Image (cartoon, rainbow, N blue to C red):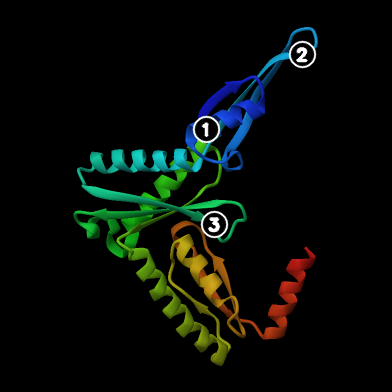
Amino acid sequence: MKQYTGRTLDEVLNAISTEQGCRVEDITYNVLEEEKGGIFGLHKSVTIEAFTSKDVKEFIFDYLGAYFTELNQGVAIEIVVEKDKDRENELLYRVILDAENNAIIIGKNGQTLRAISTVLKAAVNATFKKRIAVIVDVNHYKEDRYKKVKAIARREAINVSKTHVDCELDPMPNDERKVIHQYLQDFKNVSTVSIGEGAKRHLVIKYTPEENKERKEEEKEEI
């Protein structure tokens, strides 16, 4: 993360805004040091560390570029920045890869793609000292995968609703579990919960009568 120094915080933020071509409110920053001097403390300076979405995009592009160069893989990288639907006032960075051989980047059952995503997220969060939402996809593989897990979830949810017998799905990554959680949240007589740790973490579709679901929602609101 870059550091900036100026006489006042407003001066520093306005300088970053001009340099990056963004609004002041789009700058994420943390004050590192504020010094006062002179008889009345008029001569002072402030130092902050700050970043913008442009900085995050550049980091992702450079990081993945070096990563795939080391693997001797030709990969086109596109980064789309959009609002994060799950976190107010936060951004989501959607990274779309298109390789010479997409199957290699995806790996068996998407394992290589998940590993790339995990490493990239860790690097981004560590660099900018903040939890930043990043989704990595290869030629819309994730979109197709989400459609498939939704279809599986719907089929099993209907069965759970009819039989009143809970269903445990196979282990899957966090983003796919999240898709199912959201997809089934309004499905009658069922609820979802994730259990297990690490690579074994998976989702359970549980039979939950509507009155119980409503009670749980009320409890959440009270909390």
Image spot of residue 19 (x, y percent): 49, 31
Label 2 or label 3, whichever comes before in sequence order: 2
Mark 2 is on which residue type? Gly
At x 60% / y 56%, what residue is drawn? 87
Q: SS of the residue at dot 2?
A: loop
Looking at this view, name the residue that lies furthest to the top: 39
Label 2 or label 1, whichever comes before in sequence order: 1
At x 28% / y 62%, what residue is drawn? 108
Question: As displayed, is residue 158 above or below residue 44?
Answer: below
Mark in the foreground, 2 or 3: 2
CB contact under 8 Å: marks 2 and 3: no
Mark in the foreground, 2 or 1: 1
At x 45% / y 66%, what residue is drawn? 176
Q: Which residue is mark 1?
A: 18
Q: Which residue is mark 3?
A: 84
Image spot of residue 178 (x, y percent): 52, 65
Q: SS of the residue at dot 1?
A: helix
Q: Is residue 74 left or right of residue 131?
A: left
Question: As displayed, is residue 206 above or below residue 50?
Answer: below
Mark 1 is on which residue type? Thr
Q: Which mark is residue 41?
A: 2
Q: SS of the residue at dot 3?
A: loop
How far apart are labels 2 and 1 at the CA level?
28 Å
Label 3 or label 1, whichever comes before in sequence order: 1
203 or 81: which is nearer to us?
A: 81
How far apart are labels 3 and 1 at the CA level?
25 Å
CB contact under 8 Å: marks 2 and 1: no
How far apart are labels 2 and 3 at the CA level?
42 Å
Q: Which mark is residue 102?
A: none
Image spot of residue 2 (x, y percent): 50, 29
Mark 3 is on which residue type? Asp
At x 61% / y 21%, what residue is drawn? 6
